[in-house]
Amino acid sequence: MTDAGIRTLLIEDNPIHARLIQRLLDEVEGQHFQVQTVDRLDLGLQHLRQNVVDIVLLDLVLPDSEELATYFRVRAEATDLPIVILTGLDDINLAARAVEAGAQDFMVKSKLNAMSLGRSIHYAMEMTRAQRGEWDSPMFRLAQQQFLKASQLMKLDDNLRQRLLYPQRTLIVSFPFRRDEQDQVETVFGYRVQHVLSMGPTKGGIRYHPEVNLGETAALAMWMTWKCALVQLPFGGAKGGVRFDPTDFSRGELQRLTRRYTSEIIGMIGPDKDIPAPDMGTDAQVMSWVMDTYSQQVGHTVPAVVTGKPVVLGGSEGRNEATGRGLVYVVEAAARKIDMDLSSATAVVQGFGNVGSNAARIFHDSGVTVTGVSDVHGGLHNARGLDIPAVVDYVQRHRTTEGYPEADPVSNEELLQLPCDILAPCAMQNQITARNADRLRCRMLAEGANGPTTLEADEILHDRGVYQLPDILANAGGVTVSYFEWVQDTQNYTWSLQQINERLQQIVTGAYERTARRAETQHLDMRTAALIEGIERVVEAKLARGLFP
Ligand code: NAD
């Protein structure tokens, strides 16, 4: 699929049916199709050999091929593509046999409408992805590569290396929820992954995003394990997510989806088992619904089942801004180390959600000049410094940074290449790659997002002398204050904002110092040093517990 739409190959010899389907595809709401129509099988097979296709819509009875042979010939050419059979009422048995043989769905042409066709295509693509692509995510490959590199350098015992390479528990659920139009029921895929159960309960956010899959969730869970161990919290790593785009969902829809997802994973979570928190696309409101659904099921209020809740429900002071604040504390500790004067320093922040907007605001409050910020729609640049409180206010009113008047618009790609002292990617994974790493013009890279930098880019940045604060260190403030929230909930006791911030600073600064010391003494880059700090602690705990039975 590209921004231009879903690349659809329609193999249909009846011109009236072909025109009908093209018209219906044009009418499908929320999806755009780039359709190539052919009226013979040999032309279809040729198109598949020469072009990238996302889905095939296939009539089984064609001038040059008939019945199941048509399906098998297409399948041989497109082994892992979703195929939806288009059939007449007379040929339903044949279409059902094609589905039995591996096609994802069949649709009766005389009963088609735009909604049913759009949904059939959507689910065929979802099913194919669920069947084949779950583990195969660039993020999981990155998390495994980073772990393998660190474990080789620390000469990790092979039994433990194999044990830690995959998560201990994974759950994939598919579940329905009702859209606001009462007759529409959507089915989506959700995940919960627990990487290591040896350290205490597991802990990790819930992500709502259209790209979520098992591999991405597993990568994030693995990073949570190293992160919790690096900052010495009594948790193993976990992560969850649902694959959908929350941006065009109403509050009611989000609530129904969240409650159903919670009840699907309810056996896995609990205040002593696994404690979710917010991540991309989720917030304090989503956590309130998770907490309420869990509490309804067990019959009493259980605030400690999630963190990142509103304060009134047992949330912690300072949790909302904790990831951004922790990032700034780590930057301050690093600046002291590399003699960077923050009062004359500039920062550029990619992403203006929970992590990015708070990091930008706290940089601004502490005297750092923030010259660039961005969100998914693009970036803003003002070499003299952005008035961050005014940008925050603008985003609250317009829900985007786009159009803010006191700055020049830049693309996200250009934003990453702006000259600055501190670059803080706080949006998505896979932003700094071999393609752009040599064009970055920052002295320090502070990773608010998880997995923003690829392994090749790490090497380029290291060679260029960019001082890196890796994700598991730079964004550990979030889980640290989540830990404080969980402790307060389990003790029925609250701490003040000042206590929270002081303890946060102490913990993340301590983690920075241990990492920097290891990097220096063992001649490692900062990411590998941070990973080894975390992995060593997990390995020590695993060995102390021994093997059951
Ligand atoms: P969020 O949903 O609140 O905000 C994400 C921001 O990124 C939004 O401004 C969005 O517009 C922007 N964005 C999305 N796609 C983009 C793209 N392709 N290019 C540029 N900008 C884009 O999410 P968040 O909670 O701030 O999380 C951001 C990152 O930080 C994620 O990688 C997440 O895993 C990580 N993280 C979050 C927390 C936390 O406490 N929320 C803790 C640790 C790490």
Image: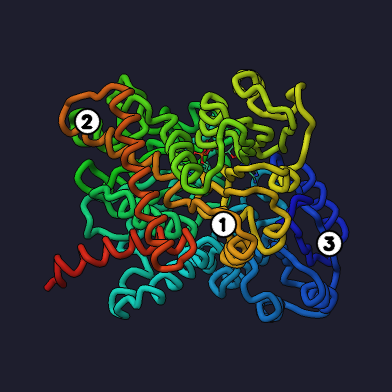
Mark closest to the chain's N terminus, 1 or 2: 1
* Amino acid type indicated by mark 1: Glu
State the residue in front, 286 or 10: 286
Q: Which mark is residue 488?
A: 2
**Element at label 1:** helix
Q: Quick check: 330 above or below 517?
A: above
Residue 482 position, x and y percent, is 32, 37
**Residue 162 visible to the viewer:** no
Give the residue type that dot 2 points to. Answer: Gln
Extreme residue in the right direction: 15
In the picture, measured across the screen, residue 283 lies left or right of residue 432, that is left
Label 2 crowding class (10 Å Cα cut-off): few <14, some 14-19, many 20+? some
Q: Quadrant of residue 128?
A: bottom right
Q: Could you classify mark 1 by the number of other residues whose Cα lies within 10 Å: few (under 14), some (14-19), or many (20 or more)?
A: some
Name the residue type under label 3.
Gln
Q: What residue sits 39% from the left and 39% below the top? A: 478
Checking the image for residue 36, the label placed there is 3
Check residue 383 in the rendering and tell me which mark sits there, or answer none: none
Q: Which residue is mark 1?
A: 126
